[in-house]
Amino acid sequence: MAHDLANLLGDVGPIVFYLVVWGLVFAGTALFVGVFIPFITGDSLLFGAGILTGTHDDLSIWILAPGVGIAAVLGDQVGFWLGRRFGRPYLTKRNGRWVKGGIRRAERFYELFGWWSVVISRYIPWGRVFIPPIAGISGMKYWRFLTANIVGALSWGVLITVIGYFAAVNPTVRPIAYAVAGVVIAISIVAGIRAWVLDRRSRRAAEADGEADAAVELDAKAATAES
């Protein structure tokens, strides 16, 4: 990713480079681009952009990182309002097994963690795409969503970008920066696995309840027929 970004910087210059990075972060959630190319709109993009900024004097971390945070906040805002405006059909009309599975996991994740789901989802590829519209569909109060959105988007966007920057500019901090990046990635993986496990348990419980209800209904019909 850093190599691709370096080529982009050489072709377009610093201003367009900033705009491309911010645009990808925004589109990743606002336009559902993150569903199809999560690595190009997520952690790898931010970490690579931070590294590149640390190795090029014509780039500034003081411009890149705040812009990433703002783009992340705005992207989630769009997703939230689309969910609130168009409701459940806005998501259900989207085809694809992976998309439907991500929506189901995100709904379960939101039910379990509420406010924190918006914060944590920023570190999960499918979560950062689906949680904002689901929060809107679920009727989450706007100011409650906004606070969670700001905390999650800024901690994710600014943190990972700055970590990449320090990994490039300061050899003494580099091991720590890579360690923190590893922890962030590990947390996102664990959170994703936990959501997947909880989703499977929920579906199995629902299937078991459905089978039990069906058995009761059959017994009732049999008793009625005998009488």
Image (tube, rainbow, N blue to C red):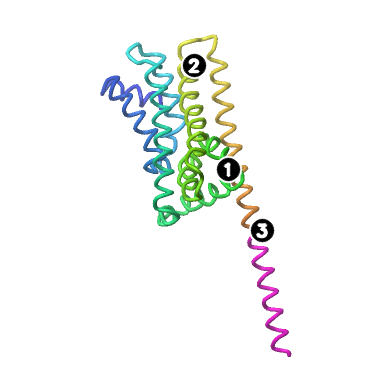
Which of the image's four quarters has the N terminus?
top left
Q: Amino acid at mark 3?
A: Ala
| Secondary structure beneath label 2 | helix
Cβ–Cβ under 8 Å for marks 1 and 3: no
| Alpha carbon distance from label 1 to label 3 | 21 Å
Determine which residue is flagged by label 3. 205
**Mark 2 or 1, which is nearer the eye?**
1
Judge by depth and name the residue closer to the eye, 175 or 91: 91
Cβ–Cβ under 8 Å for marks 2 and 1: no
Determine which residue is flagged by label 1. 114
**Mark 1 or 3, which is nearer the eye?**
1
| Secondary structure beneath label 3 | helix
Determine which residue is flagged by label 2. 167
- At horizontal 31% and vertical 27% (from top left) the residue drawn is 19
Question: Reading the chain from its start, which is encountered first: label 1 or label 3?
Answer: 1
**Mark 2 or 3, which is nearer the eye?**
3
Q: Dot 2: few (<14), some (14–19), or many (≥20) neighbours within 10 Å?
A: many
| Alpha carbon distance from label 2 to label 1 | 34 Å
Query: What residue range appears in magenta?
Result: 205-227
Q: Is residue 150 above or below residue 192?
A: above
User: Where does the image place residue 103, in percent across and percent down from the top left?
Assistant: 50, 50
